[in-house]
Image (tube, rainbow, N blue to C red):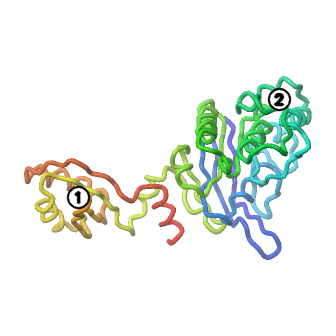
Amino acid sequence: MTTIDITKASRWFGNVVAVNDVTMNIGPGVTGLLGPNGAGKSTLINMMGGFLAPSNGTVTLDGKPIWRNEEVYKEIGVVPEREAMYDFLTGREFVVANAELHGLDDRAAAQALATVEMEYAQDRKIATYSKGMRQRVKMASALVHDPSVLLLDEPFNGMDPRQRMQLMDLLRRMGGEGRAVLFSSHILEEVEQLASHIEVIVAGRHAASGDFRKIRRLMTDRPHRYLVRSGDDRALAAALIADPSTAGIEVDYTERALRIQAVDFGRFTELLPRVAREHGIRLFTVQPSDESLESVFSYLVTA
């Protein structure tokens, strides 16, 4: 299985440090690279794609250095965020040109265009394309040589809802085939919907790695928040507030529910059903209210 290993990698431009001592592993499946604008995501992808050399540390594909390694480039497809394209070419001519760079013929280009559903516009000049169409033809260009690694920098920019769903389905399918698919985004919803694994970059540093819910549960210094609806909210609140695992309980009259802050995740998840059973209180809803990726990201940025 193809993997990219980044080990203590840094990249600086003069006095500006864009990526600072990052270590991570990108394996088969879909990985989301999450971070605010300016966090260093594009720089990291450019190092993984072979466009930039690390100033320090290593970036390898299956143990082989990526920088200036022609053999490794055959395994990598890159969809950059930048819009720089040959607007005077048609979509088909653009993808054919990239196929020829890999020693492939028109059939590979036709297959790649079909994969991203761009046959209907392949003979139009790229200058006439919408931003979403440009994204898709860049995707076709990256897929033309059937790479085992696909790196996408903000791939959903400019896409309409239908195009976004099509691309998400395509990336899921490729990840399911065993390819290493990594895409960057600062849009939390995109990452939460698509990625089975996330890597978080904040201010050039690696802030977190893994499933975002597991990451959230490791943050023991911050309360876990729950929305709970029951048959007797007041009695339940009175029974829970006495336990040290509960930091605070608020009655939300609009939602007709309790908003509970738990400081001990393990103890609280055992306590709630036990207390409800002992007091004969039915639980209708037990819903984490701060385990969205947006909440996790906010915690990481402000930590």
Is residue 161 visible from the viewing direction of this image? yes
Q: Which quadrant of the figure has residue 225?
A: bottom left
Q: Count residues near mark 1 (Cα–Cα under 10 Å), then give few for <14, some for 14-19, many for 20+.
A: many
Q: Secondary structure at mark 1?
A: strand
Q: Which residue is mark 2?
A: 109
Residue that appears at 34% across and 55% down:
288
- Percent from the top left, x then y, of residue 293? 48, 56
Q: Is residue 219 left or right of residue 233?
A: right
Q: Is residue 61 left or right of residue 164?
A: right
- CA gap, disc 2 and disc 1: 56 Å
Q: Using the image as rendered, state which of residue 208 and residue 99 is in the foreground.
A: 99
- Percent from the top left, x then y, of residue 9? 72, 60
Q: Furthest residue to the front?
A: 128
Q: Which residue is mark 1?
A: 257
Identified by mark 1, the residue type is Ala
- Percent from the top left, x then y, of residue 249? 23, 67
Q: Using the image as rendered, state which of residue 267 and residue 289 is in the foreground.
A: 289
Q: Which quadrant of the figure has residue 221?
A: bottom left
Identified by mark 2, the residue type is Ala
Q: Furthest residue to the left?
A: 279
